[in-house]
Amino acid sequence: MDRSQVSDQSVPAAPSAGAEFFWLMTVHTEDGQATQTGTLMWLPESTREQLYHLIRNAMRTRLGVDNVTVLAFVLEPNRLGGAL
């Protein structure tokens, strides 16, 4: 059963945050698929891998599941046409 859901939610930003990034993640769970989007602040010392795990864990919490398989992950600057 495909119980896709789309929501626009932000991951809490850390103090002294840097540039804003847009994210999208689609996951598969035992109940189907879910897609969520949001924004977060990228700290200069943050790595893409750290943010991936932060968002993945937030998805697990929001969906109330222990395990998810990530089908798609997008992390891009939220500002259009400008430098970071």
Image (cartoon, helix red, strand yellow):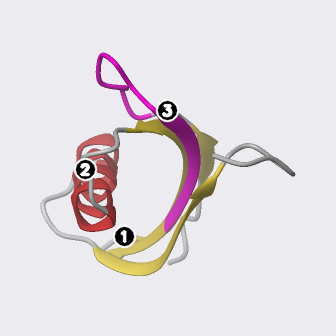
Element marked by disc 3: loop
Q: Which residues are magenta?
A: 11-25
Residue type, label 3: Ser
Quarter of the image where one finds residue 16: top left
Name the one closer to the observer, 12 or 8. 12
Contact check, label 2 and label 1, Cβ < 8 Å: no
Disc 2 from disc 1: Cα separation: 22 Å
Q: Residues within 10 Å of mark 1 (few under 14, many from 20)?
A: few
Residue linked to disc 1 = 31
Q: Position of residue 37 (x, y in %)?
A: 58, 50
Q: Residue furthest right?
A: 81
Quarter of the image where one finds residue 61: top left
Element marked by disc 1: loop
Q: Position of residue 60 (x, y in %)?
A: 25, 53
Q: Which mark is residue 54?
A: 2
Q: Is residue 45 above or below residue 3?
A: above
Residue linked to disc 3 = 10
Q: Residue furthest top?
A: 15
Q: Residues within 10 Å of mark 3 (few under 14, many from 20)?
A: some
